[in-house]
Image (cartoon, rainbow, N blue to C red):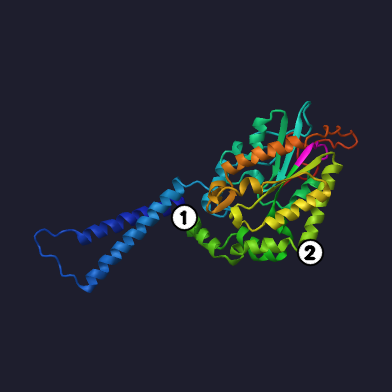
Amino acid sequence: MTLENIILTGFVCAAIACGYLLFLFFKPRGDRTPPPLTWRRWTAGNALIILFLAALVLAAGEVYYRFFQDDTDAYMLTKISRRWLRRHYQINRSEVRDSTEYVWKIQPGKRRITFLGDSFTVGHGVKDVENRFANLLRHRQPGWEVHVLAQNGWETGDELTLMESELRADYELDTVVLVYVLNDISDLSIEYYRNAVRRVTQRWQMGPFLDKSYFLNTWYYRLRMAADPDLRDYFRYVEDWYHGPLWTIQEERLRKLHEVVTRRGGRLLVITFPFLQSTGDAYPFRRIHAQMGELWSLLGVPHLDLADTLLRHPSRQVVVNRFDAHPNEYAHALAADAIEEFIQSNMANPLPEPLSEAMAAPPRNPADPFSAPSTAPR
């Protein structure tokens, strides 16, 4: 029997045992006169009630979170989140989440749309991958080859590395859509990574008992994340990143990404997703959205800001759940409508010329179009 089953059995047995003791304690004794209510008896009775309720909560919570709860948290820390990932992520041979396989050469008569992004693009929290915006576009536009080069946790540095060196040389580009989220700059902040990201992603230390109990594991992480000062002050970090030297470096990285895509024969489009924790007039990052719009306008890169599309809705309508502010299925559907129109209006450029034989590197593994001769995207 695994430790998980032992814990579940123990919680259930404890609830039954406490309930039985409580029954014996208050069981009527026939015609005999009830014992006097002394302070000791009063204390014992209340202690049994508290123990029974606690055991019942543990047993019911363990059953619920193990067999019925199936959702995510923003950082994929809880046991149920990691189980959700195993259940709902279908990874293709290109090592990305998708329900179809990719080829590296654009098929005759097709247009290729390559989405580049992080967990917003992957569809974190969306159970059926066909309900994320990229797959919705694939179904609506059969003339488009829609590829999703995205991984949870990717930042601009990861995306630039992919385009510069990890994407195989004979992968043909047409329209490349960078799906930008405001925290894509966070890998430049050494302070934030030391204080928050390293601590969160490496998971707080916990014993095997807490790690194996679905109920205790879930609430342990929820309470720790709620109490963590760096996570509570996340908005302050984001505001700081878009001032001074970090923004200068990020601006240069985005310029370079544009140059790499253009050099490889593609055309860059950009979509900016807003954070969805706070929507409406309370949204605190409109200045940063305007700052990003100015940069893309200066570079001549078409830019779609989804703030107007998504922020008009209450947060609870567009997020996965109250512990995970990634866009849900409804938000992906709203985004797909806006993105489809945006791409169509910016697809006037002709198909890219095929790569010359001198430029095309012979594939090592035809089943893996995104592996360069020596590396593959993470």
Does the stretch in magenta take in 174? yes
Q: Position of residue 27 (x, y in %)?
A: 19, 58
Residue 42, visible in the rendered structure: yes
Q: Position of residue 92 (x, y in %)?
A: 66, 37
Residue lying at the far left of the rendered structure: 31
Most frequent secondary structure within the magenta stretch? loop
Q: Which residue is painted at 53% across and 59% down in the image?
A: 221
| Mark earlier in primary sequence (2, 1) | 1
Read off the magenta span: 168-176
Please rate how many residues cluster around mark 1, counting C-alpha atoms within 10 Å: few if below 14, some from 14 to 19, many from 20: many
Quarter of the image where one finds residue 39: bottom left
For the residue pair 325 and 274, the one nearer the viewer reads as 274
Which residue, given by chain and number where applicable, does mark 1 sit on?
A: 213
**Amino acid type indicated by mark 2:** Pro
What residue lies at 67% left-to-right and 57% top-to-bottom?
A: 285
Task: Give the structural element (helix, strand or loop) at label 1.
Answer: loop
Q: Is residue 306 above or below residue 40?
A: above
Residue 245 image label:
2
Q: Quadrant of residue 351?
A: top right
Q: Position of residue 122 (x, y in %)?
A: 65, 44
Residue 189 in the magenta stretch? The answer is no
Q: Nearer the viewer, residue 95 or 75?
A: 75
Amino acid type of the residue that numbered disc 1 sits on in the rendered structure: Ser
SS for dot 2: helix
Which residue is at a point 81% across and 42% down the rendered structure image? 373
Is residue 37 shown left or right of residue 123? left
Q: Are marks 2 and 1 in contact (CB under 8 Å)?
A: no
Local crowd size for mark 2, using a 10 Å CA cut-off: few (<14), some (14–19), many (≥20): few
Q: How many marks?
A: 2
Front residue (pair 285, 373): 285
